[in-house]
Image (spheres, rainbow, N blue to C red):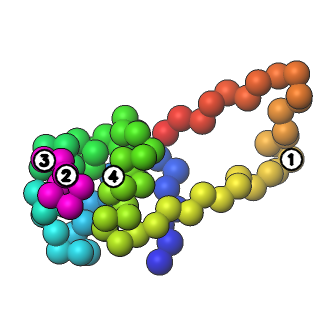
Amino acid sequence: MNFPVNTPAQARAVLRALRQARKSTQTQVGQLLGVNQKRIARIEAAPGRTSFDQIVQLVSALGGRIVIEAPIQSDTNKPTPKNQKAAPDRW
């Protein structure tokens, strides 16, 4: 099953749903990753403030995987000129 994630709220919901589908507590997942329950709670509460590495480790521990797809280009979403830097995407 794929869960598109475009916002921190969606990431929170997906992370929690993955953990609950596995019938695991935050404490149990923390033990798998070598961190305490509070760290798992913080990751679930604020995935946008969590490193990508930690998100990947958490998703992997829960039996999921992350697939990154290129954005779909539209007429209103023109490529950035070479001499102009694109603004970084933020959650």
Name the element at disc 1.
loop
> Given contact means CB atoms under 8 Å apart, are the residues at marks 2 and 1 in contact?
no
The label nearer to you, 4 versus 3, is 3
Q: Residues within 10 Å of mark 1 (few under 14, many from 20)?
A: few
Q: Going 50% across and 72% down the picture, which residue do you hit? A: 2
Q: Which residues are magenta?
A: 30-36
The label nearer to you, 2 versus 4, is 2
User: Where does label 1 land, which residue?
Assistant: 75
In the image, which disc is placed on residue 36?
Answer: 3
> Farthest bottom residue?
1
Q: Mark 2 and mark 4: span between their CA atoms?
A: 21 Å
Choose the circle earlier in sequence order: 4 or 1: 4
User: Where does label 2 land, which residue?
Assistant: 34
Pinpoint residue 46: horizontal percent, then vertical percent.
31, 40
User: Where does label 4 land, which residue?
Assistant: 12
What's the residue type where badge 1 is placed? Asp
Q: Going 88% across and 22% down the picture, which residue do you hit? A: 83
Q: Mark 1 and mark 3: span between their CA atoms?
A: 47 Å
